[in-house]
Structure formats: structure tokens, C-alpha cells
Amino acid sequence: MIPSPTTGATVELSDVVKDYAGHRALRGVSLSVRPGEFVALLGPSGCGKTTVLRALSGLEQVNGGSILIDGVDVVDVPVNKRDIGMVFQSYSLFPHLTSIENVEFGLRMRKVPSADRRSRAAEALELVGLGDLAGRYAHQLSGGQQQRIALARALVTRPRVLLLDEPLSALDAKVRVQLRDEIRRIQTDLGITTLFVTHDQEEALAVADRVAVMRDGNIEQIGTPEELYTSPTTAFVAAFVGLSNRIPATLSSGCVTVYGETLSVLGSPPVNGPVLAFVRPEDLLLVGNGTEGSIPAVVVATSFLGSLRRTQFRLADDTLVSVQHDVSEHPQPGESVALRLRGNAVSVSAIDA
Ligand code: ADP
Ligand code: MG
């Protein structure tokens, strides 16, 4: 076990701007990360997630704003002096070095004496559960094992901040979940401040203390997974985080009417008139036919998901909606049923947004 050097560092980005040859990749990104906190940067491809990590690590010079690590502005500090560990999406192990030699590499660069180097690299391999594969080369390791070695290599120098750029996206689903949980466990044990980039909302919600949703070079909203899911401040966040049904509705005086039911609106509503309401699958209920205020629907298809069932229905105006319900309910394709809104507040967007 590598003891944590101190507690993790604070990281503070203020109004960071980055231009690439005429293209503004970061439009004033501000983000404060607490010591030992695990923050996920979530957003679609091209929104600037990698650029934030590269700016923070010093691989990229910024065009404006400040970057503070433990209160010290590092904008002019070179990469190797920022005390940051990094893991990337693609396997980046040196093919001609064994696992342990790969892990030792950063220590060698720092001129750590050889005996000390070996024992620290061995500890780091133990930490990621690969102590017995020290002599293997990259081509003798699975993708998941290679990423564990990359993680050991990032941690062996005892950095104050850990940056992970889509470290799981090349792995298959099962390994991805295992390694994600393992990364979180190690990070918590070490208390190292961590930024984790992903485009996978489920991954971000599962692993992070807080999630920053990015869009087009900005952070659109930052909050705990629960806050983002239950109180998205924009339609983009509502659509990107979790599943939502998009149901035609009417907005007036700050409330939205969805199939006769009036609901409050999350975030700042667009102009009055026709809108789309984002209704979570668990915010619709299956009720008895003819229940007052219910919405007639026809069952399209149903999937058994173990602890619950998700069924797709067609409404009278041809809108398709998904509903999550108890496995004890067995809607049959073609059957006419009735749905009811639970009444929770929803996000809305203009129809053409
Ligand atoms: P993400 O990691 O969210 O997919 P990036 O941070 O890699 O996004 O990229 C943000 C934007 O900056 C994209 O539009 C991308 O094309 C552009 N970009 C990234 N790196 C470069 C570069 N070296 N030169 C020019 N444009 C770049
Ligand atoms: Mg990227």
C-alpha cells in the first residue's frame, strides 16, 4: 500500500480559455475540486473534456484564466513539476519494458535510487492487484490489466492530483465496471484528488462525488449525481444525464401542461407555447384503465431488467414513452392500458432546440 503523501490537493480553475488555431475549445471554464474529491467531467465528444485535463497537466498552454493547485498558480510550471499522475484511454505502456519496469519509469526519471524504485513499484503493482504479473510485457496482458499497470505507473510517484482520460472506454462492459469500482476504491484509500473524464453518463454517475457536465467548451452544470438527475438546470443536462421521455407539452406562466397534468418546471423555462417535457421513466405509473386523469396508451414492447421492467408505450399522438415499473406487472404488446404522471417537476426545452 502506498501511503498517501498528505491529503490530496485542491484544484481550482478560474475562467480558463483555450484556443486551437481559431477554434475556442474552452470558453472560460471554472471548477473547484476539494482535496480527495472525485469529480467526473462528462459530455459529448469534442466538448473540451480532454483539453481541461491537458491544460491542468501542463501538456497544453492556456490562453487565459488561472489554474491553482493547492493555491499555487501552475500556469507557468512545466508538466513534470506539477505533481500530477495521468492515465489515458489508449494503452500507453512501453512495449519493450515489463510491467514493473513500466511502473518504475517515472521514479527513474526522478532519479530515485534503484532499490527504492523496485520496492515502490512493487507496492504500486500490489495496490492495483497485479503483484504477480510484474515480469509480463504489455502484449502478454489483457486490456484491463494494461490499464491497471498504467494506473500503478501514474500513482507510483505519489502525485497530488490524478487525471484519468476515458481510461475504461476501450474495455468490455464487465471489465469496465470492475475496474471503475477498483479505481474508486484505490482513489478513496489514497485520498487523491481526481478528475475523471468520460462521455458515459452512467459511468460518471456511478463513480463520482460530483459530476461536471460540459457542453461546447463550458461547464453547463456541476453537482452530485443526485442533483444532476433530479434537478437539471438545463434541457441539455436533463437529456444527457439519465433516460428521459420527450413528451409534447404546453408551457404557460412558468408551468407546463403534459397530457392534462400541470407540472412545475426545473431550471429556467423557455418562452411560452409548445415545448418538449423531459419525463423520467420512473415518473410515469401504470394505472387501471379509466382512472381519472390517466393517459391512454398501447403497449409496444417490454423488457425484463431483473429488479424492474421497462416497457415502451405509444400514446394517442404517436409519442413513444418508456416506463419503469414493477416486475409483477406484465403488460402485453398490443394491450391498451392507462398511464399517469407522478407529478414531479420536469425539464422542458423549446421544440426545435
Ligand atoms: P473531448 O475530450 O471532450 O472529446 P477535446 O478536448 O479533445 O474534446 O476537444 C475539444 C475541441 O478542441 C474539439 O472541437 C477538438 O476538435 C478541438 N481540438 C482538440 N485538440 C486540438 C488540437 N490539437 N488542434 C486543434 N483542435 C483541437
Ligand atoms: Mg477526449
Image (cartoon, rainbow, N blue to C red):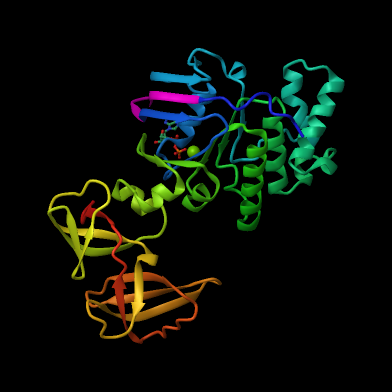
**Considering only vertical position in the picture, is 199 above or below 65?**
below
What is the x, y in percent for residue 293?
Answer: 22, 76
Residue, x 55% and y 29% (percent of image)? Answer: 35
**Considering only vertical position in the picture, is 139 above or below 152?**
below
* Residue 9, image quadrant: top right
* Residue 220, image quadrant: top left
Residue extending furthest toward the top:
76
Q: Image quadrant of ligand 1?
A: top left
* Magenta stretch encompasses residue 295: no
**Considering only vertical position in the picture, is 260 above or below 243?**
below
Q: Nearer the viewer, residue 331 or 5?
A: 5
What is the x, y in percent for residue 125?
Answer: 78, 37
Residue, x 35% and y 38% (percent of image)? Answer: 216
Count of numbered marks: 0
What is the x, y in percent for residue 136?
Answer: 82, 41
**Residue 299 visible, this angle:** yes
Residue extending furthest toward the right:
115
Left or right relative to 265: residue 67: right
**Residue 93 visible, this angle:** no
Residue, x 67% and y 42% (percent of image)? Answer: 147
**Considering only vertical position in the picture, is 71 above or below 149?**
above
Left or right relative to 13: residue 27: left
- The quadrant of the picture occupied by the N terminus is top right
Left or right relative to 255: residue 168: right
Q: Nearer the viewer, residue 120 or 308?
A: 308
Residue, x 55% and y 47% (percent of image)? Answer: 207
What is the x, y in percent for residue 294?
Answer: 25, 77
Region rendered in magenta: 11-25
Q: Main secondary structure of the magenta part?
A: strand
